Image (spheres, rainbow, N blue to C red):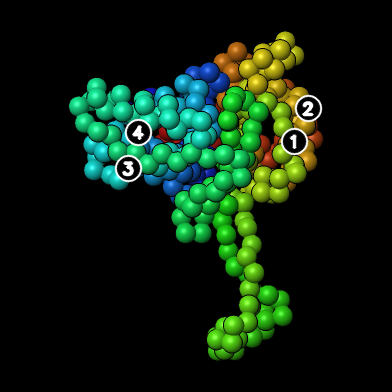
Amino acid sequence: MPSHQLAQIQIEDLDILGYSVGGEETVVAVPQLDVCFDIGKAPDQVIPINHVLLTHGHMDHAAGIAYYLSHRQFCGQSAGTILAPANLIGPIGQIVEAWGKLDGSRIQANLVGVKPGDEYAVKPNLFARAFPTKHCYGSVGFSLIERRKKLRSEYAGLTGPQIVELKKKGVTIDYPVELPLVTYLGDTNFVDFSSLEYIRDSRILIAECTFFIDEHLDRAEAGRHIHVDDFVRLIEPLRNEHIIITHVTQRTGLGEAMKILRAKMPAELFGRIRFLMDRKWRRKDES
């Protein structure tokens, strides 16, 4: 059984599946892209996903690593891949080894350390790119980027055989393009991400907004989390079609958080935002 009933938001051809409450648990998966951002307590629904992109090592985001890897092995699946900040790979390896001793078997794992700017091929044309965040030592966020080749405009009217002939002559008829699909910030204090094109133009942005009332400004700064005032600053220069809010504190009810956010931004911008834990976005059979 899952540790919690998971929320699910469908955006065109992608499902955003997860649970995220500040300080309790955060796990966000995109099954069609074979990626899970953070692992929380490793609910059963994310075990079949082959790639976990871990943003940092705090317990509410990383507690389920050993269970995820062990349960995949128990089910006869290949070793899961954990992408994590490079400074965490050693400690993660020690945790997996210790749990293997408790379990009486060696737990298989593919541990990949990353630093800002690193990329990892999730699929032949899909890459996870790490970027720096402002939360704890080594913390990163991830963008999932699809790479395609686009035909140069001067060759757009050619027939198939003509294009083949040009290729035989060694003519470069196309050029690479990047399509940022999903960006996950993880936990972070305010950072101006608008200078990073792949974040600014990502179709879907998954971002924390932990605190909403004025009395929690100090908590946001102390924990290096985002307060609603900084969240508005964060997203105003971005061009994301869809924005999903995660990691809302239990200290503020979801209805109150929505009301506060709505009052602080234009209606058009608020219309692009959904809260992951808002029940109206869950599937009908889970509501």
**Callout 4 amino acid:** Tyr
Real-space Cα separation, disc 4 to disc 3, in angstroms: 10 Å
Q: Tell me the quadrant of the picture where the N terminus can be found.
A: top left
Res. 264 mark: 2
For disc 4, the marked residue is 68
The image position of residue 82, as x and y in percent, is 43, 38
Picture quadrant where residue 168 is located: bottom right
- Mark 4 or 2, nearer chain start: 4
For disc 1, the marked residue is 192
Q: Write the residue at 65% across / 21% down.
A: 224
Real-space Cα separation, disc 4 to disc 2, in angstroms: 39 Å
Q: Residues within 10 Å of mark 1 (few under 14, many from 20)?
A: few
Q: Residues within 10 Å of mark 2 (few under 14, many from 20)?
A: few
Real-space Cα separation, disc 2 to disc 3, in angstroms: 45 Å
Res. 266 mark: none
Real-space Cα separation, disc 2 to disc 1, in angstroms: 18 Å
